[in-house]
Image: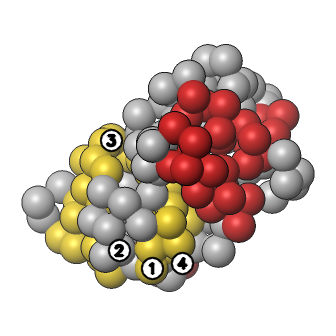
Amino acid sequence: MGRTVKGRAVVPGQASGTVLRSEDPISLWGSVDPETGRIIDPRFDRCGESIAGRVFVLPGEKGSSTGSAVLLELARRELAPAALITASLAPVAALGAIVAETLYNITIPVMRVSPEELAGIEDGERLEVTAEGVLSLD
């Protein structure tokens, strides 16, 4: 891999995938279809794209605490992102990831990086996440 970024593991885990980068914070509730994994909010910059199996990189989350249930449903249907990388704490996503691991033994790492580091993660890059919070980009 090319370069590394040190983040903070909010929900630790290992994952890899292709980056789907957004400039917009998202509420999973009402913005992502839990039956397909597609972003359905027309106001969102990545509307129409699927987060399933992708490393979803975004500045933060917003909106309803029910977003954790959406992430849990995505995990149950095997449509969850491989990992979530954000510049904010993301407690709603973290809760969904924790419950997915508890109920379904599915790990969805949630990592926090600085806004400067987040800005350096490019859409379409290959990214690997370690449980220690190291992101390797290629």
Image position, residue 29 (x, y; %)? 81, 39
Nearer the camera: disc 4 or disc 2:
2
Residue identifier under label 2: 133
Q: Is residue 47 visible?
A: no
Q: What's under tag 3, amino acid-wise?
A: Thr
Residue identifier under label 4: 115
Determine whether label 1 and label 2 are within 8 Å by CB. yes
Nearer the camera: disc 4 or disc 3:
3
**Secondary structure category for the residue under label 4:** helix
Nearer the camera: disc 4 or disc 1:
1
- Compute the Cα span from label 2 to label 3: 17 Å
State the colouring used for the structure image. Answer: secondary structure
Residue identifier under label 3: 18
Q: Quadrant of residue 3?
A: bottom left
N-terminal label among 1 and 3: 1
Nearer the camera: disc 2 or disc 3:
2
Extreme residue in the front direction: 103
